[in-house]
Amino acid sequence: MSIQFRLPKERFTAAEARSARIILRNEGTEPLELRDPFRDADQSLAYTLTGPEFPDGLSVTWRSFVLRNPAYVLTMDEAPRIRLGAGQAIEFVVDLHEWLPATRPGRYRLGARLQQEKLTVSAAPVEFEIVSSSAGVPSLGFVVAASYADAAMAAWIQDVDGQPMLMANGYDDQNAEDTEGGVTMRAATLQGPVEPGSTEALVPWSNDAQGDFSVHWLMWRHGTSLVAVGGMAATTLKPFRFDLGETPERIVRPPLESVAGELFVPVVGAGGRTLRLIRFQTSNDATEVTPGREVGRVILPGVPVAARATIQPSSVGNGVSVLLVEESLGGLDLHHVRTTSTGRLTRVASTLVRGARALPGSEPGLWMDTAGRLHALLVAASPKNPRRALLVEARYRADGRMEAPPRVTPLGLLPDAPRAAVARYRIDAHRGGEPYWAILLEDGRVLHRDSNDSHGPMKTRNPAAVPLELFLSRDDYLLSADPVLGPTFEQLR
């Protein structure tokens, strides 16, 4: 009997998936019987990883891995017996990032030993390297009007020895009830290298609630260009691209993905006085990478201090709405810009919210219901005291006009100066429209909707990702950033 490992490559980042294929082969001339070592009940095949994080070695079997992970269930008490004919082999893929997690950079050695009755076999060890890397600011993407909001996609740029790499990952808290809460953390997928100087990796929000038709996009910015990958034709080395001809004031988050395979990216132009809408389009069977194009532009009354975009549920259409917040002498001006039936941009409503001023780094939240009404939420501050927070709520009719005067609700006196804030609605089909907010204080603590006087602001394990983002699922989470692994999530308590 022989045991052989095969690795897909020799160098990995700490954040990405690491797997090893293990092959057991009967090298003899007679059949062999043994208990199947690739069943979750097995404890005869032990894998051992030795390296900087485990200088004395860390060992695991299938059974020990399952028993220490509440999200897994042991399916049998004893592995069944199998028969291997002469020269016959069986294979298995070991997810090293789960079974033998390591994040410390350096050289690692993987070995294995099978011990059953009269059979003892050791694998020839293989080596791999975890390279030094640092994670950039992550962003999250969701599906509008999905049945349940228990899944999120993340993207970020990881610097690997000076080479920026686009990373992506999916998260959920589907096992939250079984594991006493928490987001299931998975290893990321390395999408490929991007040009040095690339920034703002973003995941679109999609209106493909069924998940059957749309192209899945990722985008980022390189200088004056918007760059994207989606479908089968594009890669990070051969992406979709649109040159804005200027360094934008801001990309309005999030980019938006339609069920028709479109990617819409609203951009506030240089100087802050224009809103531009850029569209990319492809299909999953397209073989050509086509350039993006500008499909709309409007002049803005003033320079916005905050902005947010959203897309209609596919049951309503693929229309895009953008809310821009401008600070004026009388308070805050809210400007609603949206696409018309012909796809061009138009400013349909402007409203002054008196008695409010901008709070630093505060991003609005938007939600469009199935009747086509737009709901907007913003954390602001009192003009008399910047530490006295306010919650501004506005609602627009299906034609884009203001439905009623904005409502302003005091949130109380903040215990420290605010650094950033976020407001969000739940966007799923069951609990859509439920508001939530969070405020990052200068001392690093977070005050949120469910904070109370007895507990006060919460401390986070990792720094909050700025701009702030929330994952509102079975439980409620704040997006934070591990400097090596990228996205992490803090349960809001």
Image (spheres, helix red, strand yellow):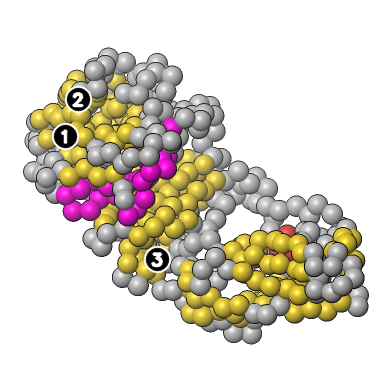
Q: Which residue is mark 2?
A: 345
Name the spot of residue 377 as percent of width and height, x first.
32, 33
Which secondary structure, mark 3?
loop
Q: Look at label 2 and name its amino acid.
A: Leu
Q: Position of residue 223 (x, y in %)?
A: 18, 53
Left or right, residue 170 beside residue 448: right
- Specify whether residue 216 is painted magenta: yes
Residue at left offset 43%, top offset 32%: 214
Q: Residues within 10 Å of mark 1 (few under 14, many from 20)?
A: many
Between marks 2 and 3 in the image, the one whose residue lies nearer the viewer: 2
CA–CA distance between discs 1 and 3? 33 Å
- Residue 483's label in the rendered image is 3
- For residue 208, above or below residue 180: above
Q: Is residue 372 above or below residue 60?
A: above
> Answer yes or no: do the residues labelled 2 and 3 have beta carbons within 8 Å?
no
Characterize the local packing of mark 2: few (<14), some (14-19) or many (20 or more) Cα atoms within 10 angstroms.
Answer: many
Q: Percent position (x, y) of residue 300?
A: 11, 31
Q: Which residue is mark 1?
A: 275
The extreme bottom residue here reads 56
Q: Secondary structure at mark 2?
A: strand
Query: Residue 329 appears in which quarter of the rendering?
Result: top left
Q: Amino acid at mark 3?
A: Pro
Q: Is 51 displayed left or right of 2 in the figure?
A: left
Q: Is residue 106 above or below residue 95?
A: below
**10 Å crowding of disc 3: few (<14), some (14-19), many (20+):** some
Q: Which residues are magenta?
A: 214-237
Q: Position of residue 117 (x, y in %)?
A: 91, 75
Q: Quadrant of residue 435 in the image?
A: top left
